Image (cartoon, rainbow, N blue to C red):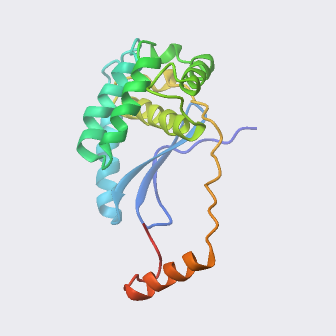
């Protein structure tokens, strides 16, 4: 017997921020309010609920390119720190998948995209799985962004299968390199942890 789903509600994350959690089409979803204060988070929830009650029809024949462009203008340009790399990601996704309608996007298309990126027929050179994983994550973000802003129907948005996450590179240091690293850390006030 299935349990009754709750409507949108606020929940606090481990970091102390509040997020909106809800279930839609059998999928648990969440959206950050970016607030640490419950009262502010409730205001964000109220605005979010009003926006969801908007009865204007959501377009059904939206292309992937439209979603990528909306995400680029509305999120990447104002917020992204590393736009230089994202220019290429946007270009390769547009080339490989941009002409498809969002509701027609399926596993066969993403598998074909992955194969073409690996062989280098999309892009300037063959891509590794970790790069393709990042690009398909960007596509997922763009599609969710479009659905959140009612630019595309949420039930038209597919789940995008990505390559498995690769293990990080291992590098073994020689004793002299370890000594040099520890000496450099001792010279600086590095704080409680090392970072790039």
**Horizontal arrangement in the rendering, residue 151 relative to residue 77 (left or right):** right
Residue 86 x/y as whole percent: 36, 38
The tally of labels here is 0
**Horizontal arrangement in the rendering, residue 172 relative to residue 147 (left or right):** right
Placement of 168 over or under 89, stated as above or below: below
Residue positioned 45% across, 25% down in the render: 123
Placement of 3 over or under 158, stated as above or below: below
Placement of 182 over or under 123, stated as above or below: below
Residue 184 x/y as whole percent: 43, 82
Residue 108 x/y as whole percent: 62, 17
Residue positioned 63% across, 45% down in the render: 165
For the C terminus, give its image quadrant.
Answer: bottom left
Residue positioned 36% across, 40% down in the render: 85
Dividing the picture into quarters, in which one does residue 50 lie? top left
**Horizontal arrangement in the rendering, residue 113 relative to residue 15 (left or right):** right
Dividing the picture into quarters, in which one does residue 129 lie? top right
- Camera-side residue: 190 or 47? 190
Toward the right, the furthest residue is 1
Residue 185 x/y as whole percent: 44, 82
For the N terminus, give its image quadrant.
Answer: top right
Whether residue 158 is visible to the viewer of this picture, yes or no, is yes
Placement of 4 over or under 11, stated as above or below: above
Residue positioned 55% across, 37% down in the render: 133
Whether residue 54 is visible to the viewer of this picture, yes or no, is no
- Camera-side residue: 183 or 27? 183
């Amino acid at each position: 017997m299935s349990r009754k789903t709750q409507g949108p509600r606020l929940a606090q994350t481990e970091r102390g921020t509040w997020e909106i959690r809800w279930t839609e089409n059998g999928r648990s979803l969440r959206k950050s309010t970016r607030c640490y204060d419950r009262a502010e988070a409730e205001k964000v929830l109220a605005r979010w609920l009003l926006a969801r009650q908007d009865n204007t029809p959501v377009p059904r024949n939206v292309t992937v390119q439209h979603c990528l462009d909306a995400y680029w203008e509305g999120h990447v340009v104002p917020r992204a720190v590393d736009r230089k790399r994202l220019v290429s990601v946007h270009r390769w996704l547009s080339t490989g998948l941009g002409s498809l309608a969002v509701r027609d996007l399926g596993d066969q298309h993403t598998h074909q995209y992955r194969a073409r990126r690996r062989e280098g027929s999309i892009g300037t050179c063959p891509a590794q799985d970790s790069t393709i994983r990042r690009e398909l994550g960007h596509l997922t973000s763009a599609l969710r962004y479009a659905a959140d802003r009612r630019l595309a129907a949420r039930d038209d948005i597919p789940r995008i299968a990505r390559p498995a996450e690769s293990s990080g590179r291992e590098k073994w240091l020689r004793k002299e390199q370890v000594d040099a690293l520890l000496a450099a850390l001792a010279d600086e006030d590095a704080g409680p942890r090392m970072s790039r």
